[in-house]
Amino acid sequence: MENKLLMSSSPHIRSDASTSKIMLDVLIALVPASLAGVYFFGLDAALTIIVCVVSCIVFEFLARKLLKRSNTVSDLSAAVTGVLLALNLPAAIPKWMAVVGSFFAIVVIKQLFGGIGQNFINPALGARVFMLVAYGTKMTQVSVPRGADATDAISAATPLGVLKEGGALPSYLDMFLGKIGGSLGETSALALILGGLYLLIRKVISWEIPAIYIGTVALLSWILGPEGFMTGDPLFHVLAGGLLIGAIFMATDYTTSPMTRKGAVIYAFGCGFLTVVFRLYTNLPEGVSYAILLMNTAVPLIDRYTAPKPFGGGKHV
Amino acid sequence: MKLFKGGVHPPQQKNTAEKATVPMGVPSVVLIPLAQHLGAPCQPKVKKGDTVKVGQVIGDTDAYVSAPIHSSVSGTVTRVEPVVLSGSRPVMCVEIKPDGLQEISEEVKPPVVDSRESFLAAIRASGLTGLGGAAFPTHVKLNPPKGTKVDTLIINAAECEPYITSDYRECLENTQGIIEGILHVLKWTGIEKALIGIEQNKPEAIKMLKQAVSNIPSITVHALPTRYPQGAEKTLIYTLTGREVPSGKLPADVGCIVMNVASVAFVASYLKTGMPLVKKRVTVDGSAVRNPQNVEVPIGTLLKEVFDFCGGFKSEPGKVIMGGPMMGVSQYSLDLPVLKHTNALLALDADEGRIPEETACIRCGRCVRACPMRLLPLELDRLVKTQQFEEAQRFHLMDCIECGCCVYACPAKRLMVQSIRIGKDYIRRNAKK
């Protein structure tokens, strides 16, 4: 028996937190938004989700194998990337494009930079922006949600598109429930907020990033209104486009967000500020993806300048 | 009261809290290491074949930072040779075969204390080292360098490690001894006041201590929030006084001396009886132990005899830890001895003892938020693993107290403290060259 005693460096006990449990919680939190997507955009939405998840998992497995690294499919991070990517695509996207997007997310952005924890931008968002550039037309043709009366069933407009191009804006209630045009998982504020609350309760995310991001967008879009100072419509800007899915699920990605609360505050404000600038002062209808990606690249800098002051004085250099 | 940042809440597991301490009989053999403290090891004062008695000095040295070693039994010396203890290089040890008579040495008599110098000399002669786990010789601690003004004696009864209840039992079973010990230390060192810090999860002990000091204005009892590592020296000082011990400095530099509650109680007992430090209250617990309890163990008793005294194992132990599960040292054999500063012996079954596989860091920041020293454990881990030791030092590697909060909190099960220990060791060795 003597030789069987295990020797190891303390501590000898661990909390039950694990990467796969965290990822599982994120998957659970994404269920309402996924169901809402399927409800409003039909089985095509379900198919898009399945294609993205399966191809992300397969690419993760193959990339790790080719790079001669340990198999990391079981940490569920590839599955999370798959769902997030799908929720950021139009339901009717040609499925081969979804496969290409999954390849870009998992292989190019994640594995070529070293795998989980090493990517410098959010894989799903990076892939979405890549697809916007590569397949612009298909990426911006959003389907009409169930229950909406539409004259043109193929290319409905997103609320932010309407804002830029002109036309009748949807009601707040439709925007809250998700009966609006958009990517398949971004439209239902209700479903996204439910998922966000679950993540908060499970302590997977903390409130700073979503609250400050959304708050900044609300405040700035109100102040910088179309009719002059403080004439904006903050509720519209909060409910429209990808803000909620971005603030709750994308900006809170651990690897590409700051580690300290102080850093999170700066980062979230930056995301909100850039989102409003993109939405109001560029030709782009939407700015959430670009705002988060830009702030992702600023995270190492933010982490450096917001590192906690060590106990007993002194600085990190 | 100032709250330190970070910390974790591991399950408390204070299973033995309500069990009165049981003295263990004379063991069949004792193995007494001659270096059980930080500082210079002792030289053997006995040789094979000598007969020794309880309380007799068997190892000592002229070095200042050291403490003598005494026999915990009467009997015959059977072996004086180096033994590899867990977590250290080979240490000279004296093995004694007890005769069972427990005859007390003529050297054992109450010391004459009439001055600060004679008090410190008595503390040295008692063999006392910090019983909370650090094993720093107490007479050195109580004699801070000239020019430092110490105004506060802090008594550490926090006992924030899971499982361990030996200090709690000390508070319940020897309340008066603790108070007497504190008064002795205050009197002879000239420190004005003493603060007893104890976690709120021990209401019975808090009540008894408060009662005991109700007429003593110089001693106050403070109930602290229950959060690991509340009992770490720096966090304890911060919570009780708001003072931060600067990087690389000692508590005395901010006017504090911290003593463990069992150490201070021992001071009173030594001044009364003259019996040096030859036995220790030890919490024996863990999923593999049949009858978890607190045991008063002669120092040098082999771990297997202590576990046998507690009914042996109910399942095969996978890991045996000396100390708590957060900072204790895993033991490679059950033939190793109980030391002066051993406060707990834990035997975990194979399942509980297993170390989970290390996976990639996801940069979630849990370690940063858990670190009571406000360091960046994930960066230190990365810097040591890539051998950037100088850079790691600039990130305050040496300020890590190795409490283990980062590793406990880590979802990727990273072995950050292990890396940090390797880094510290490398830096210390190169500094010596």
Image: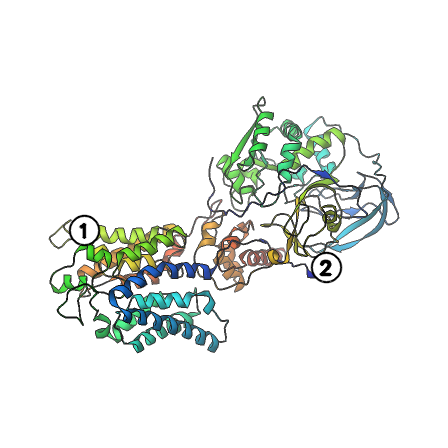
Residue B168 horizontal/vertical position (percent): 62, 37
Subunit ID for the residue under disc 2: A
Across and down, in percent, residue B276 comes to: 75, 37
* Chain letter for mark 1: A
What is the basis of the colouring in this image? rainbow
| Residues tagged by mark 1 and mark 2 found on one chain of the structure | yes
Residue nearest the viewer, comparing A184 with B402:
A184
- Residue B14 percent location from the top left of the image: 59, 43
- Disc 2 residue crowd, few under 14, some 14–19, many 20+, Cα 10 Å: few
1 vs 2, front mark: 2
Dot 1: within a 10 Å radius of its alpha carbon, few (fewer than 14), some, or many (20 or more) residues?
many
Q: Secondary structure at mark 1?
A: helix
On residue A222, the disc is 1
- Left or right: B271 as drawn, with respect to B253: right
The residue under the point 39% across, 50% down is A201
Which quadrant: the C terminus of chain A? bottom left
* Mark 1 or mark 2: whose residue is earlier in sequence: 2
Look at the image and tell me whether residue A63 can be seen: yes
Q: Is residue B308 above or below residue B414?
A: above
Q: Camera-side residue: B285 or B261?
A: B285
Q: Residue at x 81, y 39 (%)?
A: B56
Tell me which residue sits at (30%, 66%) in the image: A87
Q: Is residue B127 left or right of residue A50?
A: right
Question: Is A99 on the left or on the right of B235, as rendered?
Answer: left
Q: Amino acid at mark 1?
A: Trp
Which residue is label 2 attached to? A2
Dot 2 amino acid type = Glu
Quadrant position of residue B158: top right
Q: Relative to B224, is A253 on the left or the right?
A: left
